[in-house]
Image (tube, rainbow, N blue to C red):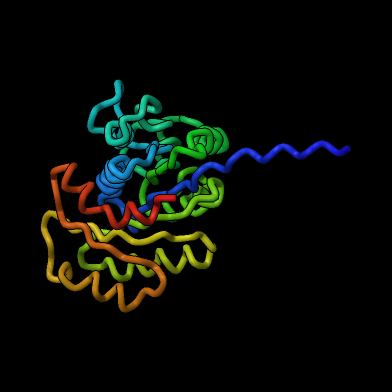
């Protein structure tokens, strides 16, 4: 008699790449808030930044990777997978410091963190086309990880164009988008009150939430609960 086939091992939970429409839109703050909200919902979560620039030795509590680990409570990794000096795109910072970026190794390390029980959040470094290496950007990262994207945009003048451009290229590249988080700045401008409504009219089939400017991590976790719900299995 034929032996019964062994069941396939369970698939890891989907990986979510958190990427911005630009630099300084609040990706780290939003990713930390999402991690806390997911934990409060009972979901195991690990958050990691593969490449971080502007880093000194030793690592600082103000680094993005350290803040992500604090938000999830994870034992490892406790900081970004590769830390680089210099405030520039990773490819530029690596070239300036004479560092070789092993892209495939970074992908392998990140994939190992996603399990059937653990949801992995990956925070990018800059916008979609910001170069991670001279041949790989965040679109390539999304494809390499089979990741879905959560787009973070700053709720300020110019965000409509930046958000639509980002969504257009994600659509062209056939990268799934779970939603857009419109992050309000500390100093709102004349566009801040109307950007969300405009984007809702212009964007179909992609949910959009607005998160107010906050400085309390617990309040931020509460503010992103709807967006965290997009990520739950």
Q: Is residue 135 visible?
A: no
- 15 sits to left or right of 193: right
- Which one is nearer the viewer's eye here, 128 or 152? 152
Residue appearing at x 29%, y 25% in the figure: 59
- Which one is nearer the viewer's eye here, 168 or 72? 72
- Does 51 appear above or below 183? above
Q: How many marks?
A: 0
- 118 sits to left or right of 12: left
Q: In the current view of this chain or complex, which residue is farthest to the top? A: 58
Residue appearing at x 38%, y 50% in the figure: 18
Q: In the current view of this chain or complex, which residue is farthest to the front? A: 1
Residue appearing at x 47%, y 54% in the figure: 148
Residue 100: percent from the left, percent from the top?
A: 51, 32
- Which one is nearer the viewer's eye here, 127 or 76? 76
- Does 174 appear above or below 6? below
- Does 65 appear above or below 227? above
- Which one is nearer the viewer's eye here, 16 or 62? 16
Residue appearing at x 41%, y 41% in the figure: 90
Residue 129: percent from the left, percent from the top?
A: 44, 55
Residue 182: quadrant of the picture: bottom left
Residue 185: percent from the left, percent from the top?
A: 17, 56
Residue 153: quadrant of the picture: bottom left
Q: Is residue 225 visible?
A: yes
Q: Quadrant of the N terminus?
A: top right
Q: In the current view of this chain or complex, which residue is farthest to the bottom? A: 201
């Amino acid at each position: 008699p034929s032996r019964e086939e062994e069941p396939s091992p369970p698939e890891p939970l989907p990986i979510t790449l958190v990427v911005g429409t630009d630099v300084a839109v609040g990706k780290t703050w939003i990713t930390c808030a999402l991690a806390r909200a997911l934990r409060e919902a009972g979901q195991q979560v690990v958050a990691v930044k593969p490449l971080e620039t502007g880093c000194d030795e030793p690592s600082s509590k103000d680094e993005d990777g350290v803040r992500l680990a604090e938000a999830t409570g994870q034992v490892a990794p406790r900081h970004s997978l590769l830390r680089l000096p210099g405030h520039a795109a990773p490819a530029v910072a690596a070239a300036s410091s004479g560092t070789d970026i092993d892209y495939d190794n970074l992908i392998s390390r990140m994939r190992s963190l996603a399990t059937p029980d653990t949801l992995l959040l990956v925070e990018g470094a800059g916008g979609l086309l910001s170069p991670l290496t001279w041949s790989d950007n965040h679109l390539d990262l999304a494809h390499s990880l089979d990741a879905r994207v959560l787009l973070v945009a700053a709720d300020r003048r110019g965000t409509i164009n930046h958000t639509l451009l980002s969504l257009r290229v994600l659509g062209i590249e056939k990268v799934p988008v779970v939603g857009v988080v419109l992050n309000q700045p500390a100093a709102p401008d004349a566009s801040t009150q109307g950007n969300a409504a405009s984007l809702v009219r212009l964007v179909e089939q992609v949910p959009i939430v607005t998160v107010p400017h906050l400085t309390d991590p617990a309040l931020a976790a509460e503010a992103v609960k709807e967006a965290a719900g997009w990520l739950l299995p």
